[in-house]
Structures are given as structure tokens and as C-alpha cells.
């Protein structure tokens, strides 16, 4: 049996471009893809913090070090420049892989620079 687990998360990245007349997908700074473990052409889910839109597309590599997060094609109707997004990738793991598995979560400042990373979400006191 496989369990679908969060593989990687880019938390609160800012949209730098929204290109309606593009073939489709989400261009992500190549350094961020490498650091998160998200592969080019991998399926990703995008959650728009500004408007609540949730959609699925795939990642493509943007120039490394550019800070680019470009929502393209039809997805450009769901996110505007400067919107904040959560980008998530998932992986199917078997029972033997689950015990040692940890996701990669990256957190960002307003210029799409990583402020810190984690492999767990801290429990917040009630």
C-alpha cells in the first residue's frame, strides 16, 4: 500500500509574473527547485493565500537565483503578481519508507529568499 505524503512545500512565495499567453505551468527559480527537491515537470498543487484559489499544475525551471515564481497559462487566471502562494508537491511512499520520511519545507521573505527550512510543522499552543 502507498500513502501520499507531503514531499516539499514552498511557503508564502510571492508571484513575480502571471503570463496568460503561455503554454502553461508554474516557473520556479531553479535554486528553489533544487533545494526543495521538486523536479521539473513534477505535478504541484498551488494554494493562493490572497484569494483562496487551489489548483494543480506542474513545475518548470526558471533561471537559478532569479526569485521567479511565474504562474502561466490558464493558471494565470487564479493568481496575480504579488499574490502569496503555498506550492506543495506530494510523493507516494510504501510502509517501509514512512518511518524515516521527512518533508522539505522552505519559508520565504517578501523577495522570495529562503528565510529558513524545516522538516516538521511546529505545534502551536492553543
Image: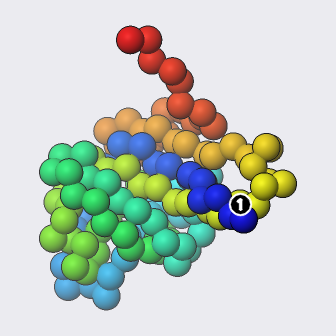
Name which residue lies at 59% across and 69% down: 39
Comparing 7 with 23, the one in front is 7
Answer with left or right where residue 65 lies relative to residue 84. Answer: right
- The quadrant the C terminus occupies is top left
Q: Residue furthest bottom?
A: 23
Numbered disc 1: secondary structure: strand
Q: Position of residue 33 (x, y in %)?
A: 56, 60
Q: Residue furthest right?
A: 96
Specify whether residue 62 is in view.
Answer: no
Q: Quadrant of residue 62?
A: bottom left
Q: Residue furthest front?
A: 1
- The quadrant the N terminus occupies is bottom right
Name which residue lies at 32% across and 39% down: 110
Q: Quadrant of residue 91?
A: bottom right
Name which residue lies at 46% across and 38% down: 107
Task: Establish if 114 lies above or below 40.
Answer: above
Q: How is the image coloured?
A: rainbow
Q: Quadrant of residue 27?
A: bottom left
Q: Position of residue 26 (x, y in %)?
A: 37, 70
Name which residue lies at 42% across and 43% down: 11
Q: Position of residue 57 (x, y in %)?
A: 38, 73
On the image, numbered disc 1 is attached to which residue? 93
Answer with left or right where residue 49 lies relative to residue 113. Answer: left
Specify whether residue 97 is in view.
Answer: yes
Answer with left or right where residue 88 lies relative to residue 38. Answer: left
Question: Dot 1: few (<14), some (14–19), or many (≥20) neighbours within 10 Å?
Answer: some
Task: Establish if 9 lies above or below 1.
Answer: above
Q: Position of residue 55 (x, y in %)?
A: 31, 66
Amino acid at each position: 500500500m502507498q500513502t501520499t505524503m507531503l514531499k516539499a512545500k514552498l511557503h508564502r512565495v510571492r508571484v513575480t509574473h502571471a503570463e496568460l499567453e503561455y503554454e502553461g505551468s508554474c516557473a520556479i527559480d531553479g535554486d528553489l527547485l533544487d533545494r526543495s527537491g521538486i523536479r521539473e515537470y513534477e505535478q504541484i498543487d498551488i494554494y493562493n493565500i490572497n484569494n483562496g484559489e487551489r489548483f494543480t499544475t506542474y513545475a518548470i525551471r526558471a533561471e537559478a537565483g532569479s526569485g521567479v515564481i511565474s504562474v502561466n497559462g490558464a493558471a494565470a487566471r487564479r493568481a496575480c503578481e504579488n499574490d502569496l502562494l503555498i506550492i506543495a508537491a506530494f510523493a507516494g511512499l510504501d510502509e517501509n519508507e514512512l518511518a524515516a520520511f521527512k518533508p522539505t519545507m522552505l519559508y520565504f521573505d517578501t523577495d522570495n529568499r529562503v528565510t529558513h527550512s524545516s522538516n516538521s510543522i511546529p505545534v502551536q499552543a492553543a
